[in-house]
Image (tube, rainbow, N blue to C red):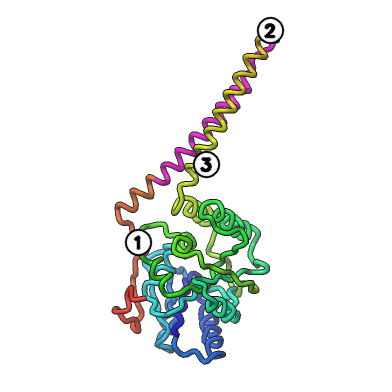
Amino acid sequence: MKISFVIPCYGSETTIEIVVDEILYVLGQREITDYEIVLVNDSSPDKVWNVIKELTRQNQKIKGICLTKNFGQHSALLAGYRYCTGDYIVSLDDDGQTPIDELYQLLDKLEEGYDAVYAYYYEIKQKPFRRFGTWMAKKMGEVMLQQPKDFHASSFYIARNFVIKEMIKYENSYPYLFGLLLRTTNKIACVPTHHRERMHGKSGYSLKKLLLLWVNGFTAFSVKPLEIGIYMGVILAFAGFIYAIVTVVRKLLYENVVMGWSSIISIMLILGGMILIMLGLIGEYVGRIYISINNAPQYVIRELTENFVEENHETI
């Protein structure tokens, strides 16, 4: 049994070596020697790539990938997945918050017959807007992707070889990993673990990036936003029809009733807002189609460390 670890790196010059050392320590607890650690530099502004290259020189089982620009966490993970060779693939963060010492809880759960197992944190130690982002992602998965309500996803998970192999078949832009996983298998479990404090720095996810991630989740693997627009259009049309009847009846019964401009403006604003929202959604779908047709890359690799073997490419 070979285990591959994939870690996207951004702003982790001071933490990635600590994370790698802990992985090696945890593997030693069960004397696992068949492993590999793939570190993906997502165009980090610090010197993390120099740290990665030094780690690969010290240990031939550690490999590094350097991307040409910041493509985002999901694209960076896919880049690492395409170079993995393990039977099991573990994804985790580079900031030290991942409880890697609880790896075997996920591994043992996987051995019960599941295809993927996620860590579920008792308490998420992040800023309020990040916790809100996690909650939004969960609700989005329930509505758009039919995610079970009692399921909790995180960035720390383990999956079988064939699951990751199926996920990397997706070659279009805007990858959304949880959506790719859900369309591959429904044998997914989660295990409660503890979330740690961040060792250094702050999250690379700004509010803007979280919003873009939500939009990506909304539109990547579902047309439900368009269906919701249809339902809202029907509801508003019905409400408008009822309001028109009420207006006519009031005018017939009470001749002195003054027809209000404010109600007309309110209705116009509501309808106009709905139309613009739906046009924006349609434009988002059309734009994604256009970009996919133009073969926009998920990522571009600038450099691989010397201990990478090109024959491993897509041999997961």
94 left or right of 59 in image: right
Are the residues flagged by discs 3 and 2 in contact, CB closer than 8 Å? no
Could you give the CA–CA distance between mark 3 and mark 1, rounded to whole angstroms?
Answer: 28 Å
Q: Tag 1: Cα neighbours inside 10 Å, few (<14), some, or many (≥20)?
A: some
Instruction: Give the CA distance from mark 3 to mark 2.
Output: 40 Å
- Check disc 3 and report its element: helix, strand or loop: helix
Q: What stretch is highlighted in magenta?
A: 256-285
Q: At numbered mark 1, what does the secondary structure look like: helix, strand or loop?
A: loop
In this rendering, the answer to whether 72 lies above or below 59 is: above
Say if the magenta span includes residue 257. yes
Identify the residue position indicated by label 3 in the image.
Answer: 228
Taking depth in this image into account, of 50 and 159 the one nearest to the observer is: 159
Q: What residue type is labelled 2?
A: Glu
Residue furthest top in the image:
255
Q: Can residue 196 be seen in this view?
A: no
Mark 3 or mark 2, whichever is nearer to me = 3
Question: Which residue is labeled 1 in the image?
Answer: 171
Q: Residue at x 44, y 64 (%)?
A: 184
Binning the other alpha carbons within 10 Å of mark 2 as few (below 14), some (14 to 19) or many (20 upward) gives: few
- Looking at the figure, which quarter contains the C terminus? bottom left
Query: On the picture, is 17 further left or further right than 68?
Result: right
**Residue located 43% across and 88% down the image:** 59
Report the front residue among 224 and 42: 224
Location of residue 206 in the rendering, given as x and y in whole percent from the top left corner? 54, 58
Q: Position of residue 25 (x, y in %)?
A: 55, 88
Please name the residue that numbered disc 2 is placed on.
255
Q: What residue type is labelled 1?
A: Glu
Q: Residues within 10 Å of mark 3 (few under 14, many from 20)?
A: few
